Structures are given as C-alpha cells and as structure tokens.
Image (cartoon, coloured by chain):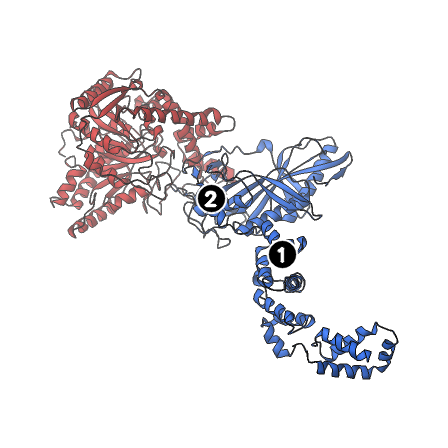
Amino acid sequence: MRGFTIATALEALDKREITASWLFDTCANAITTHDGTLNSFITPTLEQGRAHAKAADDARAQGKTGPLLGIPLGIKDLFCTTGVRTTAASRILGDFVPPYESTVTQNLLDAGAVFAGKTNLDEFAMGSGNLTSAFGPVQNPWKRTGSEAALVPGGSSGGSAAAVAGGLVLGATGTDTGGSIRQPASFCGIVGMKPTYGRCSRFGTIAFASSLDQAGPMTRDVTDSAIMLGAMAGFDPRDSTSVDRAVPDYRAALERGVRGMRVGIPKEYHAPGMSPEIEALWTQGIDWLRAEGAEIVDVSLPHTKYGLPTYYIVALAEASSNLARYDGVRFGKRVPAETLDALYEATRAAGFGAEVRRRVLLGTYVLSAGYYDAYYLRAQKVRTLIQRDFLSAFENVDVLLTPTAPSAAFATNEVPDDPVQMYLNDIFTVPASMAGVPAISVPAGLDGQGLPLGLQLIGKFFDEETLYAAARVLERSAGFTHVPALWAGAAA
Amino acid sequence: MSGYRIEGSTGLWEIVVGLEVHAQVISQAKLFSGASASYGGEPNTHVSLIDAGFPGMLPVLNAECVAQAVRTGLGLNAEINLFSRFDRKNYFYADLPTGYQISQFAHPIIGTGTVEIELADGTVRHIGVTRLHLEQDAGKSMHDQDPTRSFIDLNRAGVALMEIVSEPDIRSPEEAGAYLRKLRQILRYLGTCDGNMEEGSMRADVNVSVRKPGEEFRTRCEIKNVNSIRFVMQAIEVEAARQIEVWESGGTVDQETRLFDSARGETRSLRSKEDAHDYRYFPDPDLLPLVIEQPWIDALKAALPELPEAKRARLEAEYGITRYESGVLTVEQAVADFYETVARDADARLATNWILGDFFAALNRTGRSIENSPVSAQALRELLGLISDQTINGKIAKDVLEIMVETGEAPLQIVDREGLRQVTDTGAIDAAIADILAANADKVAEYRSGKDKLFGFFVGQTMKAMKGKANPAMVNDALKKQLAE
C-alpha cells in the first residue's frame, strides 16, 4: 500500500489496473497485520468498508466516476458516522452510535470514498501525543534509528497520522483546533492541512473549541491533500460559521510554482531553545523556495508569544461549555445515583479522563464571575491582535514559512510531567488557529535520529491554493521519500 | 405618580415593581432548529437532535423568530439594535440538554421602549421597557410519573422566547396588572405571542421591593415564574406585606429568589443570593453576531397591524364612540374587527349599543369567545339592518337574536318564518286600538280626565294585541289620535 497515493490509486482504478475491492483488502490486511501494534483505529469498519468498495467497483463498471470513488480512508473518531460507534476516544460516550452523518464524512461518501474505520485520537481532541485516549495510546510507525522505543504520533489526530504514515489507509480526516492536524503530520512524516476556519463544515463533528475547530485532510503527499480537501470542503447551511464560498479546484493550483511569490519569515518563530536541526531545516526550506524563484521577506508577528496562553484560555473556555452536554441524561455513559447532581458527578468523573477534566476545570475557571474580564475577555482581545498581525503581514507577503513543531516525535516516557510543557508542542501551530487562517505541514527532512520533521506554510484567508502551490514546491525540493520503520525492509 | 400606599406600623410604604416577562414567540419552528414549536403533542415528539444536544449538533438561527422580536420591539416603540449577539448561559439541569441556554446577555436585539397603561380611574402612566432579548426555552422535568425517577419532555426545549424586561416603574398591583394586560394585548395584536398564560406561553418573574416614599430603592426579591395576571397582583401584595413586616420588625430584606404559593397566598424562599448560579456567560461560538439591516426593519414596520392605541383613536373618530367604549371594543383585535364589520357604513350608535349590550351578553351566556361566536358579524349586521329599515322593531330584534344564537339561522329567515315583520298597516293598527279602547272604556274616561300615565297602558295593550310587531311610533300616533277624538 505504500505503493499507492490517492492520486496514483485513482489513476490505476480509472485504468482498471486495480479494483477498489483489491485496494480495500490490501488496506484491511495492513490494518489486521499492524494495528495491533499501532492502535491507530478505535473502531475498524472492515466489513462495511468491503461492501462500499464493492459498490464503488460496481459504480465504476457502470461508468460512474467520483473524485474519491473507491479510495479507502480513515475517519478520525470525532466525526459522527451513521450507524457506526463514535467515541471521541472518551469513555463518556459509551457505545454511542449516531443516527446521523457529519457533513464532512457525508461529502467524502458522496465523493465515493470508502471508510476503513474510525481512527484513534486524544480524548475529545485534547492532547498533543495521542496519550489521553480512553482506547490506549497510538504508536508512531517511525522509530529512531537503532532504537525500538515506541514514539508518540503526535496529537490529537494521532490515529489518523499513524494510519496514513503506516500505509493502513491512503488518507484520513483530522481536526485541528490548535495544531491537531499539523503537529501529528509533522511527527509522522505526512502532509496535514488545516484549512481556513469556515471552509469545512463542523456539523456532526464533536466539538472541542467551536471557534477554532476545523477539519482537514491528512495524506501522504500534497497532491492527495488537494484532492481530499476538495471533497471535504464546502458551505453547509447547518453550520452558521461555515462560509458560503465556492470550493476552488485545489489540484489545479498545485503546479503554479513560487516564482514571484513573497514568502514571509516571522522572526518571532525563532523560539529560544529550539533544536538547531529544526533551525537548519527551516533555513533549508527558505533556500528551496528562494531557489524556485520566491522572494523571501522578513516579517514580524509581534503578538506570537501570547498565542499559546490565550489559546488555552479561549479553547478551554469553549470546551468547558461544549462538554456540558455529556451529563449521562440522554446518551452515552450514565453512572446512576440518588440525586441529579450526584448523577452528574459520578458520570462525568467516570467518563472523562484526567486531561479532559483538567481542561474543563480550567475553562470553567476562566469564565467564572470575577475572572471573565481578566482571562476570557482579555484573551479575546489578544486574539484580535494576533489576527491583525497576520492580516498586516499578508499585506506584504503571500505565505509564511515556519517550522511545524518544536521537536520531532518523542517517546512516551519522555513526556513531561508538567502539562504546560506538553502544551508547548503547539507553539508554532496555535497562532494560525487563533487567526483562523489556513496552514499546512509538509514533511521536509529527517532529524539526526532519523525522525521526520515538518515545515509549516501559513496562508491568507481562503487562499489554500497558494498554500498548495508553495507546499508542492517544498515537497518536490525536499524529495522526502523516507519510509517509517514499520516499512523498513518490508515490501509495500 | 400613583398614590398607592401600604400602611405599616411605621407609616406609609410605597412598593416598587419591575417585571420580566417571558413570552413564547409564535413561529413554526424553534429558535435554532427545525422542530415544531407548537404547544402540546406527546412528550418528546417535537424534538430535533439539535434540541436534544447531541454531539456535533449546531444551532442555526430561525429568521422568523428574529422578525417576531423586531415586530414586538416596534410595537413597544423600542430601539431596534442592528447588532446583537447570542451568549451561552451555562448551568446544569436535566431538562437543559446542552448544559447551556442560548440567550442574549450583553447585546439584546431590542433596547429601551415604553408601554402606556391606563388605570381604572383613567390615569395614564408610561412604564419603561429596559430591553427585549431572544432566548431558548428549556424542556420540562416531570417528577410525578414514577416513584424513583424523573422524566424529561423536551418538546419545549429550544422554543423561542422573548424576555421583556421592564424598568422598576410599577408602583401598585393594579399597575402591574394593567402593564401585563397591555403588553399581552400588544403581543396579540402583533401576532408575536398568543399571551396564553395557562399554557405557559407567557410567564412573569416579579421583582418587588418596598420603600418609604421619596427614598432610594431598597433590596428587592424576585418571585419566579408567576403564571397568571391575578397571581402576579396577589404575589406583589403579599410580598410587599412580608417585606414591610421584615423592615418594621428591625430586620433586613435579603436579595433572593422566591416562589409564590397561590394556594397558601404566600411567597417562599427558593434560593439566596449566595446560592445564585454563576452562569459563566460568553458569546456562543457556534453563532455569528446577529446583524440586521434598516430596510428590513422598515419593511416589517410597514407591514405591522394597527396597534391598540391607534385603533382606539381611530374608532373614536370614525364611529363617534366614547373612550370607554373604544377601550372595551379594542381589548382584542378580533372584537374590534367584529365591531367594524358590523358598524361600517351602518348606524354606528346602534351597532355599538347592540355589541356592548345584547351581543356581549349572548357571548357570556353561551360561554363563547368572539372567534367562535354563535352569531357572525355579517348576521348581526343584517339584523341591525332590519331595525334600521324598519322591517322589525328593536324589541322583536332581541327575540330574533336569541333565535340566531340558538339555531344559527339568518335573521331575515327567522323574521319571515315567525311572521315578525313590523306592522305598518295603519288600518290594522287603528282596528286594534279601537278594540282596546272599546274594551277599556273606563280607562279611556280616566285618561281623558287627565290621567296621562295611562297612555303607556294603552301602548302596551296595543303591542300585546299585535304580538309586539307593530311599529311603535305608528302605534303612538294612532293612539293619540283616537284618544283625542
């Protein structure tokens, strides 16, 4: 399966060289073989997937086409899927089976995609290592050179990243609130795109922080990302924050090149203590773009340093309210008790993991009487300043280039005890989320220990096309053909 | 200023009242979902996944509910805010599915307005409206269906409410009643709320405090969820009495939320200020700020129905009726419409007297409302036409109305079948009079010797002989003539 990308598989399907059923079975075999180790799926749907793959073959036989007809995908288990258990990697949802389909997954189904299952994530998408899942941690398919130590895939879309990197599926959906697509993409050596806020509908996607959550594709390469986003995106009247704007042909933008493009390098992203390898890779990325004709411009995003603290106020405030509906009354887990308050306490104590509880408490605190102005209101003001930083930078440049994450993937036993240290993983990804602008992570090289590192491109509102054009140049220049340990020596 | 005072042991007290009215918006669908907003239905049959707070469900604002709020704002002569915003009011309760109510806290859609009230003695007062905002209703918890469990009905969850907050301008129970009646009347005219307090589509939270005249406001208590105008007036009275008692016995009134127990005629503490929820309001990130445009408001304004005060003034001018009569005839729009159908291009005085008199009496007697009146406006108009063109006289008309109420027949049909046409044949009238005078020669003699009062006796006898159908004026004329002979 390492042999195929979405684009090449579509071509082979069109030429009748392969069938969707064969493609799906190959994925199913990889899942059966490797997912005991990776744990990238919470709920595989191999039987249903096989039936859909067969239906895709029948449709093709009848001359039907579709942008993803017959392509096996993984779906982050935050997207509600009709008749298939949806967990958000939390115990609190129990065996919740939604009677409805999220708009994003419905769009993918309409495009002909075949779902191999629901992928693992941090509980309610709260985490940067896929360590908070009630269904156990996900293992990164990559390993350090000469080491067998299991590494985290990043988070929260860790299952999707691992499944794509491991070749278990050709692509997967992710959601990104402060970096949950881009950071795991960087850790797993794949492409992760967080589109403009409002580009993909949030309807039917379990909310973490409504003003930040945005779905996006996680794929092997930039071309696949463009294909998949085209199928996911679109206006949805059921989401008031979705934007009524035509979805461009992203694939057509891929080969525009960067000649004459102005690429901004924000000085504030030179974080103190950042590894020299990442600094070097960043410089390399600048050189690649310059070599292809881009003009490199130094820019300043002066409020960058406030990004992380304000993000953790806004996101957690919204989360504390969004997660109030998990109360044991109407669906999901219920721990019976004598009184209503006792039922809430018992259900939520048993249903939520430690990180979710911590975030709900923090979010509740910052909205409390007497603290609202100092925290939430102030954070919202700073958020406006961060947004302004980007808007003024984009008066001069077309895209920004930065590292995606401050480190490569780390081992479970290297996880800092201090949650704030863990939150620093999102330091480069959070500002674009706060501003709502699109950003993509592209694998650009390996660190000294043989682990992938990503570079991030940040674009103007709704200008995913320019991002894709620049990302494609980075991809081609990097020539990233490394394969994860999972595949080392194995025939694809 | 109202002179309402309560006599305490330390002197006279004035009461200060502000009302928060929750009025259910008339709309097909709920505020943020497509589920039916209609009253009733089996439990949990008018519920969408959005109302039930399922994972990933998102609210989408119903434009009709916004239009209804704007219409109401226009009806209250209030500021319409072009920018407003929905906030989340966070609290846990079993019938609040999402754990928050979507409301407008910081930026309501409607700003300050006024309601003009008229008291029994004719005094007119203006009660300020602080604001009107849109919010969702919660569901209903039922604790009496099972010995150990509570049941939840979400039919009401998500239905649009307008919370209309008054200034603390109300100074007596009577004023509170007049304000609520007037507000309800305006809402009904506008068609934005049916004002049905029994079904809970209008409820009031009553803020009461007392003070010595001329003082600053003292601490208030809020009496939650009072569901009739009478109870609001009673609750104010008993709560004011309680507070006066507390102050006069040297205590202080604590700011708290209380409940009115109508059976015992008392208010009871529900929760103190210390136990008050921290609602953690913040802007709902699932919804964009609500921005409306002046031309849209202007279009709504142009299509507004005539409101009670304007209608009163017009009816008085057009039909020459009194202030009192216009008040009664405009209490409900349907009554005013009925009145105008009858009175237009007709004898307005006759129509007014008949509607306020015999027609209302018939409604009362049959327990019907104007909407399902046993006699249509058209039929009543026909009946009055028969009086005006002298087909029947007024007394016979009353009998005809009785039959109309009973059978629903058209007046002319009744008149013809029962042979009730007025007799204007002078020959028949003269003959009847001649018979009566002949049979009562003694009384004729008394009359002629000066006992004028006996004239009425002769009229009565004549009408009786003619089964009430004679034209009264002609009977009078003929009698005078024959008695003078």
Residue B144 higher or lower than A145, as above or below: below
Query: Element type at marker 1?
Result: helix
- Which residue is nearer to you in this view: B377 or A189? B377
Query: Element type at marker 2?
Result: helix
Q: Quadrant of the N terminus of chain B?
A: top right
Please name the color used to draw chain A: red
Chain on which label 1 sits: B
Residue B394: x, y in percent?
68, 70
Please name the color used to draw chain B: blue
- Report which residue position mark 1 lands on: B329
Residue B75: x, y in percent?
54, 46
- What separation in Å lies between label 1 and label 2 (alpha carbons)? 30 Å
Q: What amino acid is at disc 1? A: Leu
In the rendered view, does A443 fall on the left or right side of B324?
Answer: left
- Report which residue position mark 2 lands on: B297
Q: Quadrant of the C terminus of chain B?
A: bottom right
- Which residue is nearer to you in this view: B288 or A144? B288
Splitting the image into 4 quarters, where does residue B9 fall? top right
Residue A219: x, y in percent?
22, 34
